[in-house]
Amino acid sequence: MPRYKLYLQSGPKRMKTEVRVLELLGCACNGPTTDEALAATPNAIRDYLRFLRCHGERVDVDQEIETEVVVHDLEGLMNPALIFEPDREPVSRADVETYIQRLTWMREDLFELIDGLSEQEIAAKPEPGRSIRRILEHIYGAEYNYVRNFGKIDGVPGPGNFEKLELPELMDQMEYMQEKEFAKLRSLTDAQRSDPIVHKSYNNTPRQYFRFMVEHQWEHLCEIKDRLGQTK
């Protein structure tokens, strides 16, 4: 029976909590309290295993799931200086291809999910929440900013003014961005895939940013699935 190690972040009162399963690259969930987030985690793991199986991975989606909290950081969800120990490992070239494969599958699923929706459905804003259109724009902007930590992305415009684009144009831009993103990630040197990424008052690691990219894509893929009433 697998025992998954959980890495948690929440505020000092253990209210909204994010759970990450680092050994299942991209798997993360959250809840309004720590207890609720932990209660949701086994189903979140199983949902992620189903995603992997749908894309050809040999995984057991019916397995009994045990979990173990190994880190619980209480400095808030947006603690930029927090580094989980596994994130200190350098990113190998084989790792890069795994990250790219996950991101490719998630983008395929995302576009398949919204295929056939009308412009009105894409633009509809729920209460509370934001429209699917705004989620797509947010995905682009975050993806751009994550990759920019490794240097300039040639030929790719930064986020902004996307509201002027028709939906097919926005989707084309997202595809173009991902193509350039993958080329950038594959071009990184050994040093760029291992050395700390230095900010003014804290450092991050390359593995963190690779992980952030995959978790972020998964988070918003699940958000749109929930919005449309579909299972993961």
Image (tube, rainbow, N blue to C red):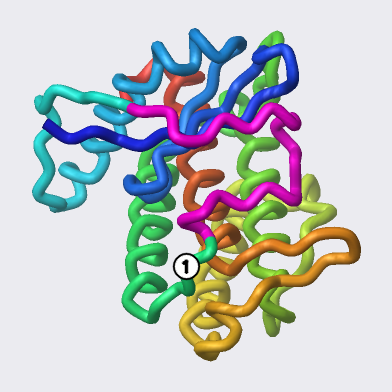
In the depicted view, which residue is nearer to us: 12 or 60? 12
Is residue 116 among the parts visible in the rendering?
no
Residue 123 pos. (x, y %): 66, 29
**Residue sitting at x 30%, y 35%:** 4
Q: Is residue 71 magenta?
A: yes
> Which quadrant holds residue 158?
bottom right
Span colored in magenta: 68-87
Residue at the disc numbered 1: 89
Quadrant of the drawing holding the N terminus? top left
Residue 216 in picture, x, y percent from top left: 55, 44
Residue 79's place in the image compared with 161, above or below, is: above
**Residue type at tag 1:** Glu
Give how far across and how far down residue 196 sits, in percent: 67, 73
Asked whether the viewer can see residue 19, the reply is yes
Residue extending furthest toward the right: 200
Residue 55 at x, y percent in the picture: 20, 50
Task: Indicate the quadrant where residue 6 lies.
Answer: top left
- Residue 5 position (above or below residue 15): below
Tell me which residue sits at (62%, 47%) in the image: 139
In the rendered structure, the answer to whether residue 3 lies left or right of residue 13 reads left
Position of 106 with respect to 10 (left or right) is: left
Q: Is residue 180 above or below residue 201?
A: below
**Which of 87/30 is in front?**
87
- Crowding at dot 1, Cα within 10 Å, few <14 / some 14-19 / many 20+, comes out as some
- Under circle 1, the secondary element is loop
Q: Does residue 128 show up magenta in the picture? A: no
With 163 as the anchor, is 25 left or right in this view?
left
Residue drawn 75% across the image and 48% down it: 80
Residue drawn at 40 percent across, 66 percent down:
100
Front residue of 47 and 7: 7
Front residue of this view, candidates 29 and 7: 7
Residue 205 as seen in the image, left or right of residue 158:
left
